[in-house]
Image (spheres, rainbow, N blue to C red):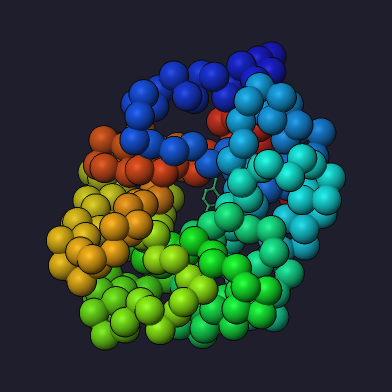
Amino acid sequence: MATVAQRLEEVKSTLPATGVELVAVSKFHPAATIRQAYDAGHRCFGESRAQELQQKYDQLPHDIEWHFIGHLQTNKVKYIIPYVAMIHSVDSIRILDEIERQAARIDRVVDCLLEVHVAQEDTKYGFTLQECADFLAQTAVDTYPHIRFRGIMGMASNTDDEVQVRAEFTQLKQLFDNLRAGVMANTPCFDTLSMGMSLDYRIAVEEGSTMVRIGTTIFGEREY
Ligand SMILES: *Cc1c(COP(=O)(O)O)cnc(C)c1O
């Protein structure tokens, strides 16, 4: 069986040489497994639970960039703010307000992506395309001095219908482009379109993803 380092290399070899960042999604995998990817030179990992992120931060070298990708509860925000490099899953104004409040307390600026819901499943969190556009049109980003609005994140439906998956990624890309040309035109750091997971990242990259979040292909199946 291939090692973590080998699978990491394999995934990287399928990504364009520049322009697409790889978040290695390490949720539910132990620190020792993450360490293998770290020793192979990788520094960017994704976690989906606040407590797990905190524990792994303590167990692993501090030059790791931790990305938070799971649904975030308001009362958990304070636990990750000191450690997190980017929050992909900002799915409500309430959470955004709490991130601002907690980041201000420790005088940090945190990179955030607004999560946009395009998939068919109704279990997924996030703003609709319209809500996201409206929110950014109506909100002066400098009312959130401790948040750096970096872009949007989305997930496609969990289906093997490639036409549907591609269409959903296209919707995210169109929103991203419209925002960049429109209300976010004066916010040059709004440069990140986080889309694509193990089963669909190739399509996501073809549709313009700048950041993929890949777990299973690198680390194997998760044990929940
Ligand atoms: C778990 C997760 C991933 C990674 O999924 P894989 O299928 O293991 O690559 C990516 N994004 C989010 C938001 C996740 O929760």
For the residue pair 93 and 204, the one nearer the viewer reads as 93
Residue 153: horizontal and vertical position, in percent? 40, 58
Q: Quadrant of the rendered structure where residue 30 is?
A: top right
Query: From the viewer's perspective, is 33 left or right of 70?
Result: right
Q: Quadrant of the N terminus?
A: top right
Query: From the viewer's perspective, is 66 left or right of 214?
Result: right
For the residue pair 124 and 126, the one nearer the viewer reads as 126
Q: How many marks?
A: 0
Q: Quadrant of the rendered structure where residue 63 is?
A: top right
Query: From the viewer's perspective, is 20 left or right of 98?
Result: left
The residue depicted at 39 percent of the width and 48 percent of the height is: 195
The residue depicted at 35 percent of the width and 57 percent of the height is: 189
Residue 95: horizontal and vertical position, in percent? 54, 79
The residue depicted at 77 percent of the width and 50 percent of the height is: 57
Query: From the viewer's perspective, is 127 left or right of 174?
Result: right
- Residue 95 visible in the snapshot: no
Q: Quadrant of the rendered structure where residue 82 is?
A: bottom right
The residue depicted at 73 percent of the width and 55 percent of the height is: 53
- Is the residue 131 above or below the residue 207 in the image? below
- Residue 6 visible in the snapshot: yes
Residue 215: horizontal and vertical position, in percent? 58, 39
Residue 171: horizontal and vertical position, in percent? 22, 57
